[in-house]
Structure formats: C-alpha cells, structure tokens
Image (cartoon, helix red, strand yellow):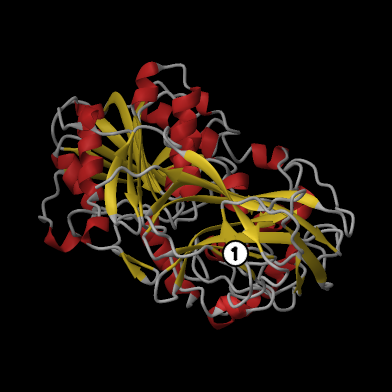
C-alpha cells in the first residue's frame, strides 16, 4: 500500500462526513471566517483554530472539532450547513500540529487542551454557552478525553470510531503491541520518511525500540511506546483511566464490528451507563454499531457485501442530535434506542437496550481433537460437550514465519474486514476446531473470549485465537480475534515470565461481534501464536520488550481434557421463531 495514499484515506475516514460538497455551495457563505485564531492553554502554549461564525446577530451554540489532521479552510461543507442553521463551528489543530504551537506528542495533552479550549469557547461573546463536539478516530479521542474533565459548557458529543485509552484501545491488546496500527499511523503523523514500497518489509525490522532508524529521523513518541509495554504512569496520562463516571453529557457513539476501536466504542457506552450517578446521562448514552471498518456507512467491507441496509446517513443523525441538544428542537432523539446494532449474517438492524444484551446466554463451546487439530483438514472439533481424556495438540511457532494478518480490525497495512481464511488454515502452525453444520440458526452478539489451557517451551510467547463463520461453500470468514502475551497472563501492570512446560490458563479477549450463523454454517475457532503485522512477533526469548534482534522457535501445546477444558465463551442470543 502506498503510504501517502494510505495515510490520506485514513485521514478522510477520521473526519466527520461533509454533506455539501464545496463545489456545489454558494459563493457567499453563511458565515464569517476567521483563520488561525489563537487559543491559549494553561501552560501558555497557543493553539490555532479556524472559526466559522454565523452571520446572524447574537451568540450561538458551537460545534467543536479538535484534530491532528488539518483544520481545512473556508470551503468546509459542514460549516456551511451548520452556520446556515444558526451554529458556530470551531476546528482546531491539536498541540504541535498544523499551526498550533507545542510539541506533537500523541494522546499526551488532549485531556487538558480539550478542556481549556471548551472553557475558552464558552467565554467568547459569539458562544451562547453550549458546545457540542464532533469528529472521528483521533477526533473521537479528543472528545472523550476532554469530556472527562467536565466543562460546564459541554452539552453533548458525537464520537465516531472513538477510543478512550491509548494503552488498552490502541497500543497493547492482551500485551501484544499493535505494530501496523501504531507504527504505520505513527509513521504518517510524524513525517517519518520510509519508502512506501518497503512498508510491509519495514514491519519486520528488529529491534522494535529503534524501528524508526529505517527512516530519516528519530521519533521520540514511537520509542516511548515501546519503552512502556505495561500500563504505567506514562499511559495513565494518555487515557481517562476508566473514569467514565466523570462523563456528564449525552453521547452518540458510532462504531463498526471490524473497526480497530470496536470494543472501545461499545465499552465506553456501557461503562457510562453503568458508572454514572446521573440518571439523565445514563439514559442518553447511545451507540450505533454497523458491519464497518474504520469508516461508518459502507455497504461492502472486506470480501462481504452486507447489502444496502448497511449504509448509514451519519450526517443526518448527527444533525438531528445537535438540533435537539444544542437548539432544543424536537427531532425524535428522545425516542432513539440506547443501542442500534447490525446483525451480520442476517444483515438487519436491531434496537437493543444495553450491552451486553440482558438476555445473553454466555455458553462455552469446547475444543476437541484426537491430537491432530493442525490445519482445517485435521481432526479438531468444536461443540458444547466438556472434554474428558483427550490428547493435546502441538504446533511450532517460528517468528521467522509468522501467520500473516488476513482481514480483521485493521487500519494501516493489512486490509480490514472479513476475508476468507481457507488458504491460511492449511498451515500446520494453526490449530483448527470446527463445529458440525448447524441445524438451527445461532446468533452470537457480544464480547467473545477464549479460555485456553496451554504450555510452551519458551519463557514468553503469544497465543492467538479467532472466531470464524464457515459457509456451506467452505469459505471461512473471520469475525473477531485476539491475542495474549504469556507474560501478561496475570496483569497488564506487571509481567511474569512462564516456566517452560508449565500448563497455564490463558484468557484471550477476542473483542466484540454480532453475527447470525445460519443453518448449514459451521462455527470455527483458530488457535495459533502470531497475527503479523497487526501484532508484533514475540521472539520467544523472554528478554526486555523491544530489544531482541533474534528469536527462537517455541513448541506450543494446547490441552483439552477434563482438567484443562479449553473453550470459547460465546454470547448466544436466544432466537424467537420467525
């Protein structure tokens, strides 16, 4: 993938949709444009913002976007629509980006800078005291981070494909470093020059702590990400530290099942509804989850066309949201369900009240084999019966030949979405456990986890798992996946190397999904030790993270017997007869 094209596409997906293309707008805009207005921060740093002030007299409600991707100019289509409707708009460069002063250190200053910006706006004569925020991806982060500070001027938010914690949601999942996301995105936003044609090969570079030496300069924050593999004070300053009880405004979250922040999106919604002591705030948390990757509204994602129903008019929903909360106009917002989700497979939208769904039946489906679950042609099976006396499965994990990332929740590098895993499942280093063809439809909606009993010949290694929908024609489409680094098996704040040959119980978080397995389809679980370059390769040495330049092979053993009942915990939703 051409790095410049990839970065541009990513940026376009980060931004809120423009409803009125600039070339179709009138030459006389409905606003007064003020470019590069200085907004002072508490430490004296001056951030730059473009203001779009409606021509009507008197103060107005304000829509704020804070972004590291450029604040554009007076041809902004959103500003034309909103200013014509009586809003002001502020688009601000994050610290160290665009025309703003300061050092660009991703995630570090957005909590304070966002709050200071809201307080500054609230005291301007053109603001009526009400602010709504918008934006996607990093622009979703800037909303959630500042909201935790509780500005009295903030009235509502619309975070699209957002995240709230740089460590948990972006950098490290189960202890595995999200290599292609963090270093691919980090390359783009740091200006690090790496030959686009060599990006795929660049992910193989070791040691990770000096990965940026492939480019033309040193990038301190990319090195910091590697220097802090556990959740410590560095990362606490780059997240809201799960303080969802501090959120005091209505929020409309929008996310996708194949988005890099899918779990973060629904978790934030659920955590505010659970932890807030404000009944009005709890009642007005909403989330829309579609079959999308890092961009809301697509019909075709990966190799699957989800039909016209998958499309979403995000612009209309956001406009109705702001009209209600900022202008007091009746737009039906109060009738919206807390959760609107797209059930893949069935390809329909459904309204729900909570997450996870209250009627969820969390059910364990167990891994079985006669000791040869390697490849989809092996003897691995998956069913609801607990194992008794069964031989273990074995495979060799060689970091020199990792399992290639094939679809899933990606942004930079590998493509995102559902892709046929059939060719991949021919590898001997993938254990494959498949159910019999289903006689009745089975819906899986919610968080998914694998409980794996395994041992390794190494002091540290990874175990990965993936949930797959196998169609009657044999094509096997990925739904969700996850990873657990062995040294993180007990804690994300402190690590412990494992003893070679010791059987450990590893809980692998596969994220979230909503899928109807139709009759004749089969459920499948893949188990392996790599998913590269989505996650970095574990060199199996147990050395300091990011320092290795060489690796060793690891002999992996997966147990499924009475004492070690390896399984996948599925959120099964009972289906009424139709």
For the image shown, how many numbered marks are present on the structure?
A: 1
Q: Quadrant of residue 308?
A: bottom left
As drawn, which residue projects farthest toward the front? 389
Task: Work out whether residue 500 or residue 417 is closer to the camera in this orientation and state it.
Answer: 500
Residue drawn at the location 51% of the way across and 28% of the way down = 244
Q: Badge 1: how crowded within 10 Å, few (<14), some, or many (20+)?
A: many
Q: Quadrant of residue 390?
A: bottom right
As drawn, which residue projects farthest toward the bottom? 197
Q: Position of residue 234 (x, y in %)?
A: 70, 42
Q: Position of residue 423 (x, y in %)?
A: 53, 80
Residue 243 left/right relative to 501? left
Residue 52 left/right relative to 549? left
Q: Quadrant of residue 53?
A: top left
Residue drawn at the location 17% of the way across and 46% of the way down = 81
Residue 116 left/right relative to 238? left
Q: Position of residue 104 (x, y in %)?
A: 57, 51
Q: Is residue 498 above or below residue 4?
A: above
Q: Mark 1 sits on what residue? A: 381
Question: From this viewpoint, is residue 549 visible?
Answer: no
Residue drawn at the location 35% of the way across and 24% of the way down = 283
Q: Position of residue 13 (x, y in %)?
A: 37, 59
Q: Is residue 425 above or below residue 51?
A: below
Task: Work out whether residue 375 or residue 243 is closer to the camera in this orientation and state it.
Answer: 375
SS of the residue under disc 1: strand
Question: From this viewpoint, is residue 179 visible?
Answer: yes
Q: Is residue 476 above or below residue 446?
A: below
């Amino acid at each position: 993938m051409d790095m410049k094209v990839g970065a541009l596409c990513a940026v376009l997906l980060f931004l809120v949709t423009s409803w009125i293309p600039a070339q179709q707008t009138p030459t006389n805009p409905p606003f007064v444009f003020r470019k590069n207005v200085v907004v002072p921060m508490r430490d004296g740093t001056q951030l730059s913002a473009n203001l779009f002030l409606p021509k009507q007299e008197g103060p107005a409600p304000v829509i704020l976007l804070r972004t590291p991707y450029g604040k554009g100019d007076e041809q902004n289509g959103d500003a034309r629509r909103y200013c014509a409707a009586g809003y002001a708009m502020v688009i601000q460069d994050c610290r160290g980006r665009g025309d703003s002063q300061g050092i660009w250190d991703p995630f570090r200053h957005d909590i304070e800078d966002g709050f200071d910006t809201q307080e500054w706006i609230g005291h301007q004569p053109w603001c009526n005291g009400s602010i709504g925020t918008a934006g996607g991806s990093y622009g979703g982060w800037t909303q959630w981070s500042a909201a935790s500070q509780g500005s009295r001027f903030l009235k509502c938010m619309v975070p699209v494909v957002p995240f709230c914690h740089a460590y948990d949601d972006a950098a490290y999942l189960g202890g595995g470093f999200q290599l292609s996301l963090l270093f691919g995105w980090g390359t783009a936003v740091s200006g690090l020059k790496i030959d686009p044609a060599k990006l795929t090969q660049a992910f193989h570079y070791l040691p990770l702590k000096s990965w940026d030496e492939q480019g033309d300069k040193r990038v301190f924050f990319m090195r910091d990400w590697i220097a802090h593999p556990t959740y410590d004070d560095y990362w606490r300053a780059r997240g809201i530290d799960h303080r969802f009880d501090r959120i005091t405004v209505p929020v409309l979250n929008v996310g996708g099942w194949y988005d890099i922040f899918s779990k973060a999106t629904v978790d934030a919604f659920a955590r505010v509804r659970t932890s807030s002591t404000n009944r009005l705030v709890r009642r007005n948390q909403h989330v829309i989850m579609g079959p999308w990757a890092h961009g809301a509204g697509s019909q075709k994602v990966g190799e699957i066309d989800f039909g016209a129903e998958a499309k979403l008019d995000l612009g209309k929903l956001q406009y109705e949201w702001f009209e209600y909360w900022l202008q007091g106009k009746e737009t039906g917002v109060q009738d919206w369900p807390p959760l609107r989700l797209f059930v893949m497979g069935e390809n329909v939208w459904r309204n729900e009240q909570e997450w996870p769904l209250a009627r969820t039946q969390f059910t364990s489906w167990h891994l079985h084999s006669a000791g040869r679950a390697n490849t989809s042609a092996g003897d691995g099976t998956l069913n609801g019966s607990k194992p008794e006396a069964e031989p273990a499965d074995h495979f060799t994990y060689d970091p020199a030949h990792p399992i290639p990332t094939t679809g899933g929740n990606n942004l930079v590098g590998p493509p995102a979405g559902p892709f046929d895993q059939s060719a991949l499942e021919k590898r001997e280093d993938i254990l494959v456990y498949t159910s019999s063809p289903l006689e009745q439809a089975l819906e899986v909606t919610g968080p998914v986890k694998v409980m794996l009993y395994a041992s390794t010949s190494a002091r540290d290694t990874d175990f990965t798992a993936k949930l797959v929908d196998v169609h009657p024609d044999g094509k096997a489409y990925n739904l969700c996946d996850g990873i657990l680094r062995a040294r993180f098996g007990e804690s994300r704040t402190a690590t412990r190397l494992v003893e070679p040959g010791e059987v450990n119980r590893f809980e692998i978080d596969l994220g979230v999904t909503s899928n109807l397995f139709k009759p004749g389809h089969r459920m499948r679980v893949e188990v392996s030790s790599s998913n590269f370059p989505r996650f970095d390769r574990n060199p199996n040495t147990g050395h300091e993270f990011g320092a290795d330049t060489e690796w060793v092979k690891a002999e992996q053993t997966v147990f499924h017997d009475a004492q070690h009942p390896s399984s996948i915990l599925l959120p099964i939703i009972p289906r009424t007869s139709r």
